[in-house]
Structures are given as structure tokens and as C-alpha cells.
Image (cartoon, rainbow, N blue to C red):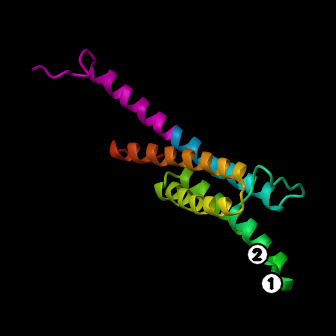
């Protein structure tokens, strides 16, 4: 039985150039996927009322929605609690975006965990459109962490 040699017919320079191109593509992919943290931060500001315009039909944060529904007993602290939670969510997404662009795989995994937990809250509030947006972000961040994993397995420094 003969084993196929995948690199047969290529010179060492061609092989090295191909590997370098693959690493560059993986770096580009993980940076592009990390940019979705910034999109998530912007959409969360749009959906939670941090911006003058509020569009919470398509974009919404489940934990903020739950606090809006069940946080009325907080009394005078209610608006402050909602605003603080929304601002904290925005800052966490921005921080994860910068960490993801720096090549930290944990940022992608943290984003996946946070959004997966928030998807449960979205199911409770019946926000199906927002659930779909969350699922898209989780998918993109999964792809980003996978690209970083592949890049680190090659034995090359990240980004």
C-alpha cells in the first residue's frame, strides 16, 4: 500500500510560502471574528437604550430585559440598575473585542459563554429575533476561537 505524499512536487520555498499564507489567513479570520464583539457592543447599546434611539425588536439583551420586567421592586434604584447593567454589558463586549483582536482565545470562549447564558434569558422573554442574532454571534466567535486554536497548533505566535 502506498502512502500519498500531499506535498509532493513542491519545493521547500513553496511549502513555506503556503504555510505562511495559511497562518496569515488564520490571523485574518480570528481578527475578523473578534470584530463581531464590537458589533455586539454597538447593537447592545442600540437595543438597551444607551443611545438616544432604541431598537429592541431585533437587538436586545436578555438579562437587561429580565431586569426591566422584574426589577420594579428596586424602587428609585431601578433606572440606575438597568442603565448600569447595560453599560457593564457594553464595556465587557468592548473588552472582549480588544482581547480577541490581541489573539486571546479565552476572550472568544468567554463571549460564547456569556451569550449562551443570555440566550436562555431571551428564550424566557420570547425574543426570538434577538435569539437569532445572539446565535449568529456565538457562531462567529466559535469560528474565531477555532482559528486561534489552529494557529496555535501550528506552533506560531498569535497575531
The answer to which of 107 and 70 lies nearer the viewer is 70
Is 32 rendered above or below residue 119? Answer: above
Q: Residue at x 21, y 22 (%)?
A: 5
Q: Counting other residues with Cα less than 10 Å from the Cα at mark 2, is it few (<14), some (14-19), or many (20 or more)?
A: few
Q: Quadrant of residue 118?
A: bottom right
Q: Counting other residues with Cα less than 10 Å from the Cα at mark 1, is it few (<14), some (14-19), or many (20 or more)?
A: few
Residue where numbered disc 1 is placed: 73
Q: Residue at x 33, y 28 (%)?
A: 16
Q: Which mark is residue 70?
A: 2
Instruction: Give residue 75's position: percent from left, percent from top.
Output: 84, 85
Is 42 rendered above or below residue 63? Answer: above
Q: Are marks 1 and 2 in contact (CB under 8 Å)?
A: yes
Instruction: Give residue 146's position: percent from left, percent from top.
Output: 44, 45
* Residues rendered magenta in the picture: 1-28
The local secondary structure at tag 1 comes to: helix
Is 6 rendered above or below residue 50? Answer: above
Q: Which mark is residue 133?
A: none
Amino acid at each position: 500500500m502506498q502512502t500519498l505524499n500531499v506535498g509532493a512536487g513542491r519545493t521547500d520555498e513553496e511549502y513555506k510560502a503556503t504555510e505562511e499564507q495559511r497562518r496569515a489567513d488564520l490571523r485574518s479570520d480570528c481578527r475578523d471574528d473578534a470584530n463581531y464583539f464590537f458589533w455586539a457592543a454597538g447593537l447592545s447599546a442600540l437595543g438597551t437604550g444607551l443611545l438616544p434611539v432604541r431598537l429592541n425588536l431585533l437587538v436586545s439583551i436578555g438579562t437587561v430585559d429580565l431586569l426591566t420586567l422584574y426589577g420594579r421592586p428596586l424602587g428609585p434604584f431601578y433606572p440606575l440598575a438597568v442603565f448600569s447593567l447595560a453599560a457593564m454589558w457594553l464595556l465587557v463586549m468592548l473588552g472582549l473585542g480588544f482581547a480577541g483582536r490581541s489573539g486571546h482565545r479565552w476572550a472568544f470562549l468567554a463571549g460564547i459563554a456569556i451569550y449562551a447564558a443570555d440566550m436562555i434569558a431571551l428564550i424566557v422573554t420570547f425574543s426570538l429575533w434577538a435569539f437569532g442574532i445572539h446565535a449568529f454571534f456565538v457562531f462567529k466567535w466559535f469560528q474565531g476561537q477555532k482559528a486561534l486554536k489552529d494557529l496555535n497548533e501550528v506552533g506560531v505566535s498569535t497575531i
